[in-house]
Amino acid sequence: MMRMILVGPPGAGKGTQAARLVERYGFVHLSTGDMLRAATKAGTELGKRAHEFMKDGKLVPDELVIAMTIERIGQDDCKAGFMLDGFPRTLPQAEALDAALDAAGTKLDAVVLIEVPDYKIVGRITGRRSDPVTGKIYHLEFDPPPPGVADRVVLRADDNEEACKQRLKKYHSETAPVIPYYGAKGILRRVDGDTTPDGVARGIAAILGA
């Protein structure tokens, strides 16, 4: 059983690696967005409370997100392991999540950080193109769209250079402080993300002891 968090800057390849981890290890992939939508759709008490914020376009409070996370990881399918993605995003969230996990009698085994230099992140993100028909994401250098698709792919509004730099700035100011926090706990594991997806996957597998 592995209980882990996947961390890294925007464009580091967390989505790609998360999908591979789910396929290889059978982890339950937990994203806060998915949990919020599922709880709201199911009409749970926490879901109803979250919906009151979401319908007004407000952020769901940390304590409510953490309560939903604890509720979710207590379900049977998470007994074989789970992977949190996109949460915690701030140091206070990390501290509150740890407190809630302790109270629930569980703990994290690893926090896997995919490291990629900022200048490489900008190149990765600005090179992405989206197919408006299928929704598939391509990259002009690493995964170019095939003939017949290339003419219709578009650059998403949030994938331009300025938007990318703002996202990186927010990552460094808000999320990066969780890195030394988990490092001090002895559960932080670093992976070189400046390589191929297969290379990153091998690095994560080595960390997980596979």
Image: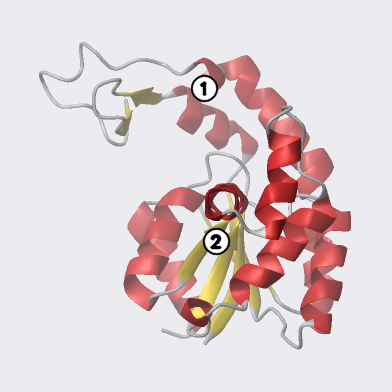
What residue lies at 59% left-to-right and 53% top-to-bottom? 43
In front of the other: 130 or 11: 130
Quadrant position of residue 72: bottom right
Can you say which quadrant of the picture contains the C terminus? Answer: bottom left
Q: Identify residue type, mark 1.
A: Asp
Identify which amino acid the numbered label 2 is placed on.
Leu
Residue 189 seen = no
The residue depicted at 77 percent of the width and 77 percent of the height is 101
Q: Earlier in the sequence, mark 1 or mark 2?
A: 2
Q: Which residue position is annotated with label 1?
A: 159
Element on which disc 1 rests? helix
Foreground label between 1 and 2: 2
Which quadrant of the figure has residue 153? top left
Q: In this rendering, would 121 be left or right of 184?
A: left
Q: Quadrant of residue 52?
A: top right
Give the residue at the far top of this rendering: 151
- Compared across the picture, whether 118 is left or right of 184 comes to left
Q: What's the colour scheme? A: secondary structure
Q: Is residue 146 visible?
A: yes
